[in-house]
Amino acid sequence: MKYQQLTLLCALEQYGSLSQTAEHLFVSQPSLSHALKKLEEELGCILVLRHHNGVSFTAEGKLALATAHEMLGEIVQIRAIAEAAQKYPEQIKIASNTLAGMDVLKRALFADDGLADQTSVHLQELGDAALLHQLQYGNVDAAILQINALDPEKERARLARKSGLQLTPLGTHALVILVRRAHPLCHKQAPLVADFFAYPFVTAHVETNRLLAEALAHRGYTQSPLEIQDTACLNALLQNSDCWSLVSASEKSRHALQADGLTFLEASDFAPRCAFYWLAAAGQQDATSAALLTKLRSQLEKGGEA
């Protein structure tokens, strides 16, 4: 969807009728109706029902509206970053190895009295190995690393020894199995992780889920994980197949929003964890890092089980 289409949907929700929306957007009502019809044709569904006293959103329209709000929020954040970059030539470069980590960083940076109001921050998403490499060579100032494993602390200690970097714990969430509601195992009481081995395991982060794949292999899962490039594609695949994935319990709302018909299960014999760590070169935790650490921990506590 284009920016104008996003604002159109949000304005329709706010003003409740085509005439008032057209008035506040400074366009004619026929032009507004044409734009709405064109958007519905592009999406292949009816978004809005017209009534004598206003409009109402269909189920598809409500999903599109939720997406519009999310995308406009991202645009606002991008503009804020761009404005900060113009105002503050000095940049702090922060990376994350997952989208979940990026979201936590954004919420912390743009919270009330966030650090983005005080300095320019450049965010980037990198693979696990690239993130560590860039941090070691000074191309990134700090990073938030997500480790998915049965024992994340063991992996944290190994990475600290190997890289010489300081990994500060931020918070830990449970990992749950994500499948469609029509999955054959959806209604099984107390499922075992081995029950899912007849179906392909899918991940959007092969590197991050490497330890999970090894743990599954130890339990007899012989297939290689299927890699999907982003969570939206992963959700679409799960929605239309019997594949399964492991996601953070704190990300339930994101997955539910992106794809209807998905549900979350817990294997009674398999309890992996999703842990977040703040990375910086040893001895280089400055005042800015300390302030951001406090905000990151607060955002992770809000996002799920700590």
Image (cartoon, rainbow, N blue to C red):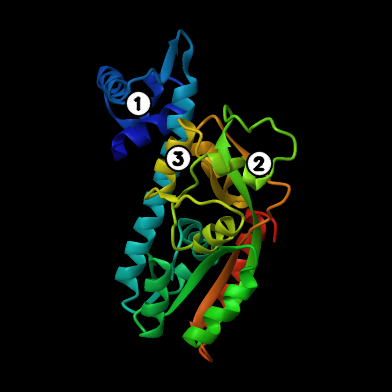
User: Residue 204: x, y in percent?
Assistant: 44, 52
Q: Give the residue at mark 3.
A: 69
* Callout 1: SS: helix
The amino acid on which the numbered mark 2 sits, given as a three-letter code, is Leu
The CA span between labels 3 and 2 is: 28 Å
Relative height, residue 4 to residue 47 (above, below): below
* Callout 3: SS: helix
Residue drawn at (50%, 59%), measured in percent from left and top?
Answer: 209
Return the mark for residue 23: 1
User: Residue 43: x, y in percent?
Assistant: 33, 25
* Rendering quarter of residue 48: top left
Is residue 83 toward the left or the right of residue 149 in the image? left
User: Residue 82: x, y in percent?
Assistant: 32, 63
**Mark 3 crowdedness (10 Å alpha carbons): few <14, some 14-19, many ≥20:** some
Relative height, residue 11 to residue 251 (above, below): above
The amino acid on which the numbered mark 1 sits, given as a three-letter code, is Glu
Q: Give the residue at mark 2.
A: 265
Residue drawn at (34%, 25%), measured in percent from left and top?
Answer: 22
User: Residue 173: x, y in percent?
Assistant: 65, 58
Q: Mark 1 or 2 closer to N-term?
A: 1
